[in-house]
Amino acid sequence: MHEGRQHARIRSIGIHMPSTRVSNYEKAAKVGFEREFLENKLGVVARSVMEPGETTSDLAVRAFNDLAERTEVPRDEIQLLVVVTQHPDFKVPHTAAIVHNRLELAKHCMTFDVSQGCAGYTHAVTIVTGVMDAANLNHGVLITSDPYSDKVADDDRDVSLLFGDAATATYFSRSGPGYRLIDSNFGTLPDSYRCLMFRDRLEMDGAAVFKHAVQEAPPSMKELLARNQLNVDDINLFLLHQGSKYLVEYVSRKMRVPPERAPFEASHYGNTVSSSIPLMLQKHIDDAELERIVLSGFGVGFTWGNNLLQLSKG
Amino acid sequence: MHEGRQHARIRSIGIHMPSTRVSNYEKAAKVGFEREFLENKLGVVARSVMEPGETTSDLAVRAFNDLAERTEVPRDEIQLLVVVTQHPDFKVPHTAAIVHNRLELAKHCMTFDVSQGCAGYTHAVTIVTGVMDAANLNHGVLITSDPYSDKVADDDRDVSLLFGDAATATYFSRSGPGYRLIDSNFGTLPDSYRCLMFRDRLEMDGAAVFKHAVQEAPPSMKELLARNQLNVDDINLFLLHQGSKYLVEYVSRKMRVPPERAPFEASHYGNTVSSSIPLMLQKHIDDAELERIVLSGFGVGFTWGNNLLQLSKG
């Protein structure tokens, strides 16, 4: 509401990737998947698995600690802490309040959780940017933490080979160099919420998820580019939700984006839900200065969200 | 991000208040509370109770239907649907996706849930305002639905007399007359998240909640007024979270706000958590044009949030 002030930008990202990896080869054979399918379609040959008994807030705190090691985060000035999760430690309170306490953040900090699945990061980048503007906040942290390893049935063909545990912590501020949200768009497909559900365990209709994703992600990204007078070649990097290797390849082919600009990087940790995009973003923005990046999340709901980010030098 | 465009404003509110009311007199006697305590301290003589088997999304849909009866909501143009709840129908997907489906909203609609308790509406008013600006959305709906009647132990002295079921649906647009968010502030008290928890049932340390509320709500509201060069007399109405009659009276006395400008209205339905403030707001903005309103939520976390709203005539 304070026009003329600088908008929030992504300054730095911390990650927590569990050191424990479980190979998928044996399990794939057991549930009847060919090696070729595992390696080239699913694309996940090993999954990252948290320690027994770890919670959503445990992973969140570890991701924040990694962030604080990489970047000087003004801990006492953090005015916004958002946790994106569909697996809070408890129903009440929100996990952000627990993480706030464990990180010993200051009192003048807004805390809430966002429940959104695989498109959670793209939704939350827009939420954090909007809230920091609307409430005139200078420093915010966005955490993603959706561990699934303890929530899928071990013998479930549809999901037991797919998901990995991880968490990320993204630091936003309104000054300094970073990636600023230029525009974003979102959608929810009517009559599709049953494709991913958690009642007592995770249930997925993989064919429906795939169909919805290839149908909705490419045109929505194209719409976002078109309304910003950009085309695919103006974007240095597309970071697509890592649903499966085949899905990432299919979506990028449909977008006519060459594979090196829409990578699949989850082969040794799996689909980490809301953490899949920031895990990649951390690596790429640490490696190089990129002018424009598109993030595209899709999944649970069935929903999708796209962010157009642009480098801002200060 | 599109400076110069109009900011979102609250256009209209729909509510769902269950017709079933359960008197508290008999139960109060059973758990050993005096009639005087029930009527003048707790202040809740009857609780609203949803139908057996009703869900969070059921109440949400009913609130939206009431909104659509009161106001012409352009259903096909709704681009944002937020559900504030700590009791989603399922962990996955978010309840907003289910409500989106049940209301047959259009595809180009962003959906997510916000987990935040008694201060949830004040948080979400800022979130919705910020997201509508950041993503350039014209029409949004914010639903609150936190039914507790099936989640508290019937013999629990601390909570079984307090909570009522209800839901609300607030319509925001970027044009037309309504109440615009001018400023807001928020906080999370360190080392306090245990005062309200839901593990297998709701547990509340009522004394701690009261202490935190009377300590944090008045100074934070005063800070919000001061930084906007306003004093208590410039505000037509303070709508305080209806934690209990005594709490509302105590906070407003500390603020030197006369009782008629900080009403307690929950005596015949109870503490409806995130719905407590919008239930009152609906009534008051339908009754009269008020220049400025302050909303103040506090509870779960322990957190608080204050919104300064101002009438905008078009």
Image (spheres, coloured by chain):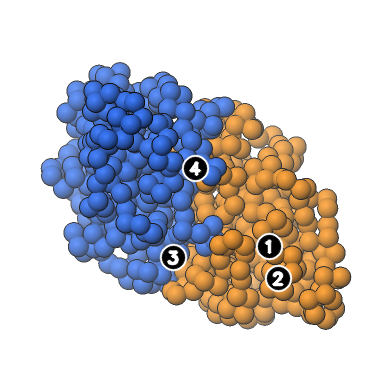
Chain colours: A blue, B orange
Chain for mark 1? B
Task: Say which of marks 1 and 3 sits in front.
Answer: 1
Left or right: B100 as drawn, with respect to A131: right
- In what element is the residue under mark 4? loop
The residue under label 1 is B152
Q: Nearer the viewer, residue B287 or B217?
A: B217
Q: Amino acid at mark 3?
A: Ile
Task: Tell me how far mark 4 sits from mark 3, CA to CA.
Answer: 24 Å
Q: Secondary structure at mark 3?
A: helix
Residue shown at 78% from the left, 68% from the top: B44
Q: Amino acid at mark 2?
A: Asp
> In percent of the image, x 33 and y 31: which residue is there?
A30
Quickly name the residue at label 2: B156
A277 sits left or right of B78 in the view: left
Residue A292 location (% of width, % of height)? 23, 36
Q: Is residue A129 visible?
A: no
Determine contact: label 1, label 2, CB under 8 Å.
Answer: yes
Tell me if mark 3 has few (under 14), some (14-19) or many (20+) residues whose alpha carbon lies within 10 angstroms of its own: many
Q: Which residue is mark 3?
A: A98
Residue A264, by quadrant, is: top left
The residue marked by circle 3 belongs to what chain? A
